[in-house]
Amino acid sequence: MFGIFSAENRLKALSAIWLVFFVVSASAISHEWARMTSELIAEEGEPHYGLPDLWDGQQVVCIHFPDNSTHPDYSDGRHHIDYDGIDFMTDSESNATGACVGGFSGYENGFDLVLDATNVTGGKLEVGYTVSEWGPYVQSIGGHEPTGNAYWALYHDGAMAMVGVGDLVVDEDSVIVWQVDTW
């Protein structure tokens, strides 16, 4: 009866527990390592240009704030925030201030992707919008509401979108960028 509590059996049980722990945490460790060693994509003309290589082939949403109205949390460059809300890299040499949230997959609709991506920032990039017969119209992002002849412009894979965000069909490697433009 006391044989089941022998040192050999305790060692086997402890080994099994460590093995299960390692197998369960291996994916998280691998992803964390990828974040720590990620580099920015340097191929100009590629929609993922300037984004972490960790996100290559995945969906990304970027918010670029105007020079005269930077967001207080993102004023020191372009922050890169992973799908789980971890801000893991800041590109202080970028010409843009703001944030890119990436590492997403499986989205087909641009508006769903934008809302979920901005939600992982804990309200820092909250999207203010109205819905009309033409679909959602983004009025503010991160508390910034353009005035006068300025508006939040939507870009998809490097080009101005020809449809609104509610009608935007995204691919598995789509990059959506919001920036303030003028009429």
Image (tube, helix red, strand yellow):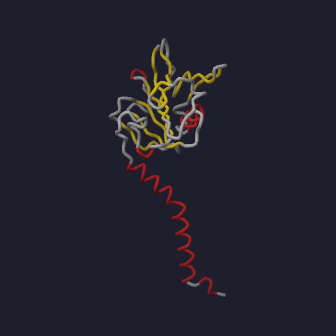
On the image, the x and y values in percent for residue 80 come to 44, 39
On the image, the x and y values in percent for residue 51 come to 41, 39
Would you say 183 lies left or right of 138 here?
A: left
On the image, the x and y values in percent for residue 124 come to 52, 33
- Front residue of this view, candidates 109 and 140: 109
Q: Residue at x 60, y 24 (%)?
A: 129
Q: Residue at x 56, y 67 (%)?
A: 20
Name the image quarter holding the N terminus: bottom right
Determine whether 61 is above or below 28 in the image.
above
Q: How many marks?
A: 0
Determine whether 40 is above or below 69 in the image.
below
- Front residue of this view, candidates 73 and 111: 111
Q: Quadrant of residue 10?
A: bottom right
Determine whether 100 is above or below 30 in the image.
above
Would you say 121 lies left or right of 68 here?
A: right
Residue found at the very far left of the displayed protein: 93
Determine whether 153 is above or below 11 in the image.
above
Q: Quadrant of residue 56?
A: top left
Q: Residue at x 60, y 34 (%)?
A: 109
Q: Quadrant of residue 163?
A: top right
